[in-house]
Amino acid sequence: MGIVMCSRLSFLAVLISVFLIGASAVFAQTVNVNTATKTELQSIKGIGEKTATRIIEERERAGAFESLEDFALRVKGLGQKRAAKLVEAGLIIAHGEASGQPKPSLLSSATLKSQVAQEVVAVKKRVQGRPSSVSAEPYWVKPK
């Protein structure tokens, strides 16, 4: 059995954080290392002009990259850690996929912001409408 600490303000903060994290993930862009141009590669955080040139030269010399390990070993000055960070930033290693395509998204930025704002207002109204026995101070809830 554990004791859980709850408060209305922390609930609201968590709700807003979840929406904002989701919003940033919706608009992330991926770039396929096996098909990308120099400019597309440079759009990834951590890839400058020299690294983009090295990637393209190695790809032309020895063919498509097969895996993250293959990519990290073949590109001079890259290494496993940096290659992993590039993947986190949106670089993908795949065959035959178009690069520069945004990840699927059903909502535009304006629509998403509007929905987040509406949800925040709705949560605030629900929280403010609670009986006075519920204080803004944290309280302990003991699970059954």
Image (tube, rainbow, N blue to C red):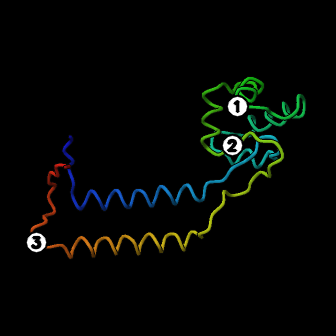
Q: Mark 2 or mark 3: name the one nearer the start of the chain.
A: 2
Query: Residue 60: x, y in percent?
Result: 89, 34
Q: Mark 1 or mark 2: name the one nearer the start of the chain.
A: 1
Q: Which residue is the extreme one toward the right?
A: 61
Real-space Cα separation, disc 2 to disc 3, in angstroms: 51 Å
What's the residue at 58%, 59% (across, down)? 26
Q: Which residue bears the numbered disc 2?
A: 91
What's the residue at 71%, 42% (across, down)? 92
Front disc: 3 or 1: 3
Q: What's under tag 1, amino acid-wise?
A: Leu
Q: Mark 3 or mark 1: name the one nearer the start of the chain.
A: 1
Query: Label 1 neighbourhood size at 10 Å, few (<14), some (14-19), many (20+)?
Result: some
Front disc: 1 or 2: 1
Occupied quadrant, residue 67: top right
What's the residue at 13%, 66% (across, down)? 134
Real-space Cα separation, disc 3 to disc 1, in angstroms: 56 Å
Occupied quadrant, residue 104: bottom right
**Considering the image in quadrants, where does the N terminus appear?**
top left
Real-space Cα separation, disc 1 to disc 2, in angstroms: 10 Å
Query: Residue 46: x, y in percent?
Result: 64, 39
Which mark is drawn over residue 57? none
Q: Which residue bears the numbered disc 3?
A: 132
Which mark is drawn over residue 68? 1
Q: What's under tag 3, amino acid-wise?
A: Ser
Relative horizontal placement of residue 63, taking residue 98 as reference (left or right): right
Q: What's under tag 2, amino acid-wise?
A: Leu
